Image (cartoon, rainbow, N blue to C red):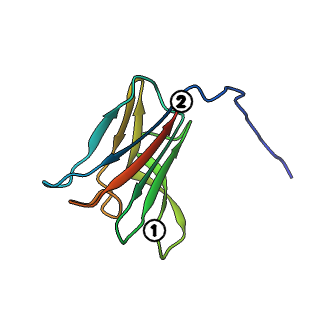
Amino acid sequence: MSVTSTQTNNQIRQLTVGRYVDTGTAAAFVITLGYKPRYVKVQNLAATGATIEYYEGMADASAVKRVTAGDMTVITTLGITVSETGFTVGLDTDVNVTSEQLSWLALG
């Protein structure tokens, strides 16, 4: 059996939390942090309770997704894309829903 493991020994220097509600038509949205996040979690606080999470090194627009009644899956579109100054949340229809409050956490 072969195991490959990598680890970054950086301390968490930034932690930012926030909430987002779009009462218009749901669309991808950008959160500006002033730093590049290494981890992002976005959770729908409504009945679905769906979450998407980005871990450092994941491809753009991907995420680990969990819906209340389902297993975790890796999505490769409509997820989270990080930039040098924040992140974009795609239009995943289980998480990013019109008039439903989202809570997010970013670590840098």
Helix, strand or loop for disc 1: loop
Distance of label 2 from label 1 (alpha carbons): 25 Å
Report the residue that reaches farthest toward the right.
1
Amino acid under label 1? Val
Question: Looking at the image, is 70 positioned above or below residue 66?
Answer: below
Query: 18 and 89: which one is in front?
Result: 18
- Mark 2 or 1: in front is 2
Q: Is residue 103 left or right of residue 8?
A: left
Q: Is residue 17 left or right of residue 102?
A: right
Instruction: Report the residue marked by disc 2.
Output: 108
Q: Name the residue at 34% across, 47% down.
A: 19
Q: Name the residue at 54% across, 70% down.
A: 71
Report the residue that reaches farthest toward the bottom.
69
Percent across and percent down for residue 100 are 27, 61
The image quadrant that residue 75 belongs to is: bottom left
Percent across and percent down for residue 78 are 34, 51
Query: 14 and 86: which one is in front?
Result: 14
Percent across and percent down for residue 26 are 20, 54
Instruction: Residue 67: give its label.
Output: 1
Instruction: Residue 94: give its label.
Output: none
Q: Name the residue at 27% across, 42% down.
A: 29
The image quadrant that residue 6 belongs to is: top right
